[in-house]
Image (tube, rainbow, N blue to C red):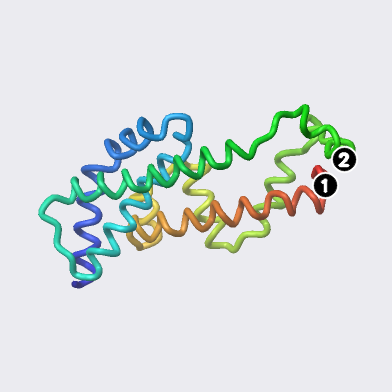
């Protein structure tokens, strides 16, 4: 299957189904609804990869909803698994005495954000700017980057993971962490 056909089918499906699919995921996720956008991105990524392998879909909507439902189930499992590991504050008293006092009101968030972003490549900084500061859609970002929405979704997911990993490091290096 050629890439142009797959990109065209992906874009058509994304335009038609992204918003309702995100509402579907949000409702199904309940307490874990923060993962709705990730579930939608994952569903479209799977769809695009299958298109690239030559698969044809008579009903892309059904495939996307089924894939999103599977992704929602996994996200809910992760959410509740992590929730079970969360301990009440009273149980953490022994550990709390070993930690530095964390005073979020003393943090210079702009300076820490600048430090965090300085750890990203130019391409990652541009993606961050467009996605999280300008709030552009995947389709808009794809047009700027001369890419497709599925590739942008994949890059955005990797960027979120990288930033999550850098947050503790930046806080620790600047004496702001809790450890």
Asked if the residues shown at circle 2 and circle 1 are in contact, with their CB atoms under 8 angstroms apart, the answer is: yes
On the picture, is 25 further left or further right than 75?
left
Residue lying farthest top?
90
Real-space Cα distance between discs 2 and 1?
6 Å
Q: Badge 2: how crowded within 10 Å, few (<14), some, or many (20+)?
A: few
Image mark for residue 179: 1
Q: Quadrant of the N terminus?
A: bottom left
User: Which of these two is toward me, 131 or 37?
Assistant: 37
Residue 63 is situated, as x and y percent measured from the top left of the image, at: 21, 50
- Residue at the location (37% across, 48% down)? 71
Residue 43 is situated, as x and y percent measured from the top left of the image, at: 32, 51
- Residue at the location (36% across, 33% down)? 28
Residue 136 is situated, as x and y percent measured from the top left of the image, at: 42, 44
Which residue corresponds to mark 2? Answer: 100
Residue 176 is situated, as x and y percent measured from the top left of the image, at: 81, 43
User: Which of these two is toward me, 97 or 138?
Assistant: 97
Establish if 118 lies above or below 33. Answer: below
User: Element at badge 2?
Assistant: loop
Q: Badge 1: how crowded within 10 Å, few (<14), some, or many (20+)?
A: few
On the picture, is 179 further left or further right than 43?
right
Q: Disc 2 or 1, which lies upstream in sequence?
A: 2
On the picture, is 5 further left or further right than 44?
left
User: Element at badge 1?
Assistant: loop
- Residue at the location (48% across, 42% down)? 134
Please tell me in which quadrant of the rendered image residue 33 appears.
Answer: top left
Image mark for residue 93: none
- Residue at the location (63% across, 40% down)? 85
Establish if 57 lies above or below 97. Answer: below
């Amino acid at each position: 299957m050629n890439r142009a056909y797959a990109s065209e089918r992906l874009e058509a499906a994304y335009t038609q189904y992204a918003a309702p699919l995100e509402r579907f995921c949000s409702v199904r996720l309940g307490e874990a609804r923060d993962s709705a956008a990730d579930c939608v991105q994952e569903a479209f990524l799977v769809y695009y990869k299958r298109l690239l392998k030559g698969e044809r879909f008579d009903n892309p909507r059904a495939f996307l909803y089924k894939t999103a439902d599977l992704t929602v189930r996994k996200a809910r499992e992760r959410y509740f698994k992590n929730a079970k590991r969360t301990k009440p504050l009273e149980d953490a008293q022994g550990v709390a005495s070993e930690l530095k006092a964390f005073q979020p009101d003393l943090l210079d968030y702009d300076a820490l954000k600048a430090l965090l972003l300085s750890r990203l490549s130019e391409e990652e900084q541009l993606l961050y700017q467009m996605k999280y500061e300008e709030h552009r859609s995947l389709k808009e970002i794809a047009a700027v980057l001369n890419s497709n929405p599925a590739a942008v979704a994949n890059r955005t997911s990797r960027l979120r993971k990288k930033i999550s990993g850098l947050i503790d490091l930046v806080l620790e290096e600047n004496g702001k962490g809790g450890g």
